Amino acid sequence: MNCPACKKGPLESSEHVELPKTLLCPYCQGQWIQASRYWSWVEQHGANLPEKPAPEQVWQPIDSHRILLCPECGALMMRFKVGHGVGFSIDHCSACGGIWFDRNELEALKDRNLHDDIHFIFSQAWQHQVQSQQNNALYQKRMEQLLGAEDFLEAKRIKGWLSQHPKRSIIQAYLTNK
């Protein structure tokens, strides 16, 4: 099986501690996980680990942004945004179920305990949540641009206070009454 990213040579077997067995490209350091190996690992792994915040040691994933063909079956692979504060996408073959990770992507997911949630990343629910988070971040950025940084912080403070207030509906009615 040849590397789908750099196409320089064959993938070589690689073992990881606490990760599924992968096939590694010795040139670009990308990793391929066959679907059967991934699912066997998930079954043996046990309970799902809770997600962790981003660690201080940040991996520098090299996201290829190229359209890849599956090294196993030749089908077109789909890119899925990881989200959850992770700024890269992973490639998945919907035909055979294999997964391609560019250099350091799998390690970055492991640091966040997302390595045991990889199959969820390909779900419609996960992708919807990622899109909602991105839309919210864009909305927040736009509001800050419109209001200015200082007024935006004050509006956020007031919004937080109001959302916790037992008489919030009365206060909101008062604020919107002309």
Image (tube, rainbow, N blue to C red):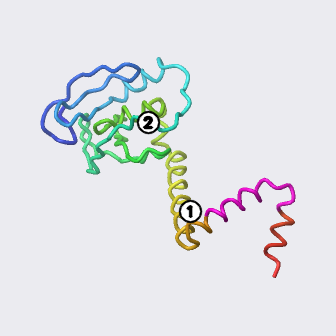
x and y, in percent, of residue 42 in the image: 46, 24
The kind of residue tagged 1 is Gln
**What residue did someone put label 1 on?**
140
Residue 62 against residue 98 in the figure, above or below:
below
Give the number of the disc on residue 33: none
**Quarter of the figure with the N terminus:** top left
Give the number of the disc on residue 56: 2
Q: CA distance from mark 1 to mark 2?
A: 25 Å
Q: Helix or strand or loop: what does disc 1 sit on?
A: helix
Q: Residues within 10 Å of mark 2 (few under 14, many from 20)?
A: few
Residue 52 against residue 47 in the figure, above or below:
below
31 or 34: which is nearer to us? 31
Asked if residue 3 lies left or right of residue 49, the reply is: left
175 or 110: which is nearer to us? 175
Q: Are marks 1 and 2 in contact (CB under 8 Å)?
A: no
x and y, in percent, of residue 104 in the image: 32, 35
What residue is drawn where x is 47% and y is 46%?
83
The image quarter containing residue 71 is top left
What residue is drawn where x is 29% and y is 32%?
32
Picture mark count: 2
The image quarter containing residue 60 is top left
What residue is drawn where x is 42% and y is 30%?
110
x and y, in percent, of residue 103 in the image: 28, 37
Q: Which residues are magenta?
A: 153-168
The kind of residue tagged 2 is Glu
Asked if residue 49 lies left or right of residue 69, the reply is: right
Q: Magenta-highlighted stretch: main secondary structure?
A: helix
Task: Report the residue that reaches farthest toward the left.
Answer: 8
165 in magenta = yes
Residue 32 against residue 131 in the figure, above or below:
above
